[in-house]
Image (spheres, rainbow, N blue to C red):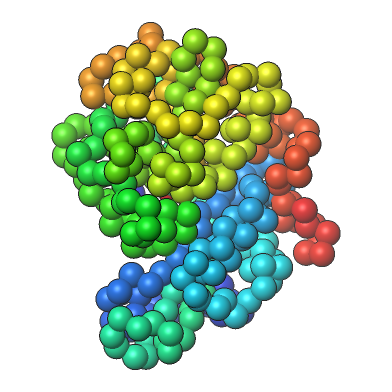
Amino acid sequence: MAVNNYEHVWHNGKFITWREATVHVSTHALHYASSLFEGIRCYDTPHGPAIFRLKEHTDRLVNSAKIYRMELPYTREQLAQAMVELVRLNNVKHCYLRPLAFRGEGEMGVNPLKNPIEVYILAWAWGKYLGDEALRNGVDVCVSSWQRFAPNTLPAMAKAASNYMNSQLIKMEAITNGYTEGISLDTNGYVSEGSGENIFVVRDGRIYTPPMSASVLPGITRDSVVTLALEMGYALSEQNIPRELLYIANEVFFTGTAAEITPIRSVDRIVVGKGKPGPVTHALQDRFLQIVQGRAEDKYGWLTLCNLPVAAAR
Ligand SMILES: Cc1ncc(COP(=O)(O)O)c(C=O)c1O
């Protein structure tokens, strides 16, 4: 997917242009993957552009930095404010926001501690991540031969660029074999997540999702879906999911900022349920989209309106 980028970029407290947003080849992150990021959607709502769960995404970036001993030179408030201002300056109705913090140019070698920390925020237009039909009809996926990294190897709770080398192996294998996406298992053989999405399974009226101990990213859409599912009266368990439950489930779906709530219609060519999005997936997808698109009351305060003065934007 080519980047349909927006002109203005935030860099270390200043606005620059997309073309100016470049780095030197000796940048530490390019050699040693010392880079952390976030992915956030800003939705077009009747009240103007609104960023979804800005606080939680900013908190996750700060947590990723803490895990990697990276002292961000900006506060949570400054980063959140920068994203609101970036949306305004680019004058867009909706976009995808990509804050990125990495170790820059300076020393060479594995020790990253002396390299400067660079923070950028990019904005671009991102449509339906898994394809235009995906949200409506579902996607065909496989279980990957690549496992998710083991606990105490790479921290799954950090959204770090290094984790996405594992995701890339999963994604490339899936695409090469004719699937849209791959699901990784954890090192105990339980279901973990997609290459860029968390996963939910519905069986006999109960919703299941893997726990944090299954090497999953603590997804913010995952958390939103758990909140909505409980609000809507569904029984939900965070528990280890054996691979075969995917094959005999009534419904399976992915969640993620890019993928939103994407139904899964087959796993390893075994049809899930009736081979089309089921009622629970539908109900959650509807409720989620109504809230993020500003068509239902924002009762959890998940939207930050960008048209308001910054101090009042929430
Ligand atoms: C590996 C992985 N898991 C899960 C998710 C879903 O997280 P979120 O809902 O916060 O976007 C993402 C996307 O960010 C991801 O890359």
Left or right, 166 with respect to 210, comes to: left
**In the picture shown, does residue 81 fall above or below 105?**
above
User: Is 233 or 105 nearer to us in this picture?
Assistant: 233
Can you tell which quarter of the image residue 108 is in? bottom left
Left or right, 202 with respect to 245, comes to: right
Q: Residue at x 50, y 58 (%)?
A: 38
Indicate the position of residue 204 as horizontal and vertical percent values: 49, 10
User: Is 129 or 274 nearer to us in this picture?
Assistant: 274
Q: Residue at x 38, y 11 (%)?
A: 273
Q: Residue at x 54, y 38 (%)?
A: 222
Q: Residue furthest left?
A: 177
User: Is 35 or 138 nearer to us in this picture?
Assistant: 35
Indicate the position of residue 267 as horizontal and vertical percent values: 29, 24
User: Is 245 or 92 nearer to us in this picture?
Assistant: 245
Can you tell which quarter of the image residue 221 is in? top right
Indicate the position of residue 199 as horizontal and vertical percent values: 44, 33
Q: How many marks?
A: 0
Left or right, 199 with respect to 296, comes to: left
Can you tell which quarter of the image residue 283 is in? top right
**In the picture shown, does residue 133 fall above or below 259?**
above
